[in-house]
Amino acid sequence: MSNFVDVAGIFGENVFNDRVMQEKLPKKVYKELHKTIDDGKELDAITAEVVAAAMKEWAIEKGATHYTHWFQPLTGFTAEKHDAFITAPDADGSMQLEFSGKELVKGEPDASSFPSGGLRATFEARGYTAWDCTSPAFVRQNETGAILYIPTAFCSYTGEALDQKTPLLRSMEAIQTQTLRLLRLLGNTTSKKVRPSVGAEQEYFIVDRQKYLKRKDLIFTGRTLFGAMPPKGQELDDHYFGVIRPRIAAFMDDVNKELWKLGVSAKTQHNEVAPAQHELAPIYAECNVAVDHNQIIMETLKNVAESHGLQCLLHEKPFAGVNGSGKHNNWSLTTDDGMNLLDPGKTPHENIQFLMILTCILRAVDRHADLLRESASDVGNDHRLGANEAPPAIISVFLGDQLQDVLSQLISTGEATHSLKGGTLHTGVRTLPDFAKDATDRNRTSPFAFTGNKFEFRMVGSRDSVAECNVVINTIVAEAFSDACDVLEKAEDVQMAVHDLIKEYASEHQRIVFNGNGYSDAWVAEAERRGLSNITSMVDAIPALVTEKSVALFEKFGVFTRTELESRVEIQYEAYAKALNIEARAMIDIASKSVVPAVLRFNRSLSDTVNSMKTAGVDIEVPLEMLRESCSLLAEAKQALKKLEKSADEAAVMEAGREQAVFYHDVVSADMEALRAPVDALEMIVDKEEWPMPSYGDLLFEV
Ligand code: ADP
Ligand code: MG
């Protein structure tokens, strides 16, 4: 069979993983390195030197000519700069390839070109990338060569975080410390490490690249700024889990192979709800690695798509009126001795440790719902959260029947005596087996849902990094654990105190639990009654980062300083303004240079028709009516265009910051909508041959 793929054989073949390290490193060095990876012991220069040499040799065998410190600045993308392994030639002109311990451990990109939110002036250019040995290095190969990628954290000269990874690693330390503290109080004497486990399910669209290249809006902004709805949308639900077409299957096949080679355990793939929409889910991994893997997944989807003549769209809402794309962040806590702390077991009512952890999480989410909401906000996600589609912008937690019942027992009687059982599912067909049902059904409308042995945070946008939400989840849960420990450490009878605390938290934070339909209007009203906030835009979500409550939280656990938080706020407002500026400019450009001329051409041919029909003495009412309609829509479009030009100009000269972002949100985006409406109406009447770009139908159904 020519198509045979040796999955086990290729898995991780381009990763400098533990197996390779055991093979390539002297035992002593391997052990030393592990002390750094596992316990955070400082890496000594000699160990670094030996590891670097082994890594270089291994990478060169894989065809690598260069290495790069790979990092995640606050641009929303990853960054890399390639350095060849070469040194100055010897006197005889020959070349020794080199890669030192120093080069492995520290890099120095020019930090002034990355967003720093005022953390540093542009003339202070120093920034450092530091090797993150907890995420394995890998080699990426393509047609033109291969590069060794070294995952790194990125900090300023003065040590402030300029990236996603630094706070993530800090938050992982915080939650480990606080979880172990809590576990000890609950009688656990064996676990030594606790890591968040994360599995990020990725949604995306695939369109034909030739068609994509004819859409300036997709090229410049990642989403369509114009486009009338096709005759058919997603109303038949015939795409979801549908048969994967051969062209897409071939693409997915290559994506999987590429990911497996890079040690990413791509597991599940299926068609999503919208036409041309798909999903990829890897098996969960340690938080930090999962965040890196998600970046690798996004980059691989894009690269492989191009090589198949396709284009991957990661924007949260590439097509108005069609379901957008998100990312589900599955999160749990795993100990080094193999426990999932979010596993309730068969009888959750007896599982005191689980109930303590669960109610702490409820407390964390209730106290810091605004931060969670903020962590999922990005420019594209504004078109989903609280706008045209689910998930809702209100943070709530879904627990399901079984856990809800246990908590209700606790709250009403102070005692939980039983757990609901799943029972048996009878299919009514004799040839099908009956099977045991889960004790709890699913709920697809909840933003923070308990799904058996993990929480699934469903608000994140498809293009966004999952780092931010995990920084928040790790830190707020660390705080809740820490607060619980503060109480328990003072208690005379810890058992009793745990029991009381579970009851107290369950009662106090009941309001955050919602098991109903999160998409309904009734929930919006109910949430308001409960005092839960409903933040519908990114500009309104951003301030949550710098409330006194948030600053105290992040500073207490050493995740962010106030200055770092303030800088992130600035960066976010600026990112929002820049994105909207590009969208507005792209709209103006497309409308003036492509749409208006096309409509004029169409109108001229219509009026030619009218004239010749008139000469022939035929009734001209129909073409005349069409011409009138087209002219009036064109006039409307021209007027809207003028208005948009004015507001976009006004916005562009405003000082960067909240006011500017709010202006883009309130004024410029409304003007964009006003321009879109007549143009989309024109698309429905202008000759398809004349229309300057492929339609929604062409893009969504002709892949
Ligand atoms: P579900 O059907 O509940 O969504 P899946 O098995 O399809 O669960 O998994 C969805 C994602 O959640 C996958 O990426 C999976 O690896 C991840 N996942 C499963 N268990 C855990 C866990 N304990 N912690 C974190 N992520 C998990
Ligand atoms: Mg899921």
Image (cartoon, grey):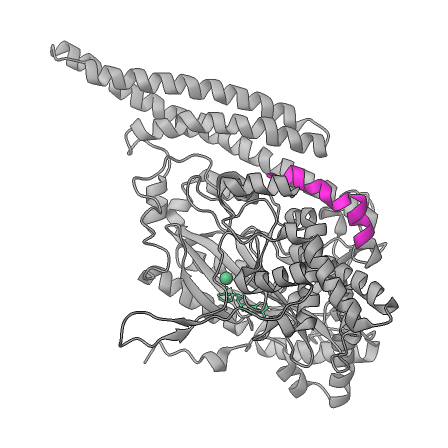
Residue 45, position as x, y percentages in the image: 83, 76
Q: Residue at x 74, y 56 (%)?
A: 109
The stretch in magenta equals: 534-553
Residue at the limit of the structure toward the bottom, as seen here: 27
The answer to if 393 sits in the magenta stretch is: no
Q: Position of residue 555 (x, y in %)?
A: 83, 54
Q: Quadrant of ligand 1?
A: bottom right
In the rendered image, the quadrant that contains the N terminus is bottom left
Tally of numbered tags: 0
Q: Residue at image x 83%, y 77%?
A: 44
User: Residue 90 in the image: x percent, y percent?
Assistant: 74, 74
The answer to whether residue 379 is seen in the rendering is no
Residue under the image location 55 percent in, 40 percent down: 524
Query: Is 538 inside the magenta-drawn segment?
Result: yes
409 or 374, which is in the foreground? 409
Image: 526 above or below 362: above
Pinpoint residue 631: horizontal percent, then vertical percent: 35, 17
Name the residue: 46% across, 78% down.
Answer: 7
Whether residue 126 is situated above or below residue 10 in the rendered picture: above
Q: Nearer the viewer, residue 582 or 660?
A: 660
Foreground: 309 or 97?
309
Q: Is residue 621 visible?
A: yes
Q: Quadrant of residue 343?
A: bottom right
248 or 329, which lies in front? Answer: 329
Which secondary structure class fits the magenta region best?
Answer: helix
Q: Is residue 40 left or right of residue 279?
A: right
Q: Residue furthest front?
A: 413
608 on left or right of 96: left
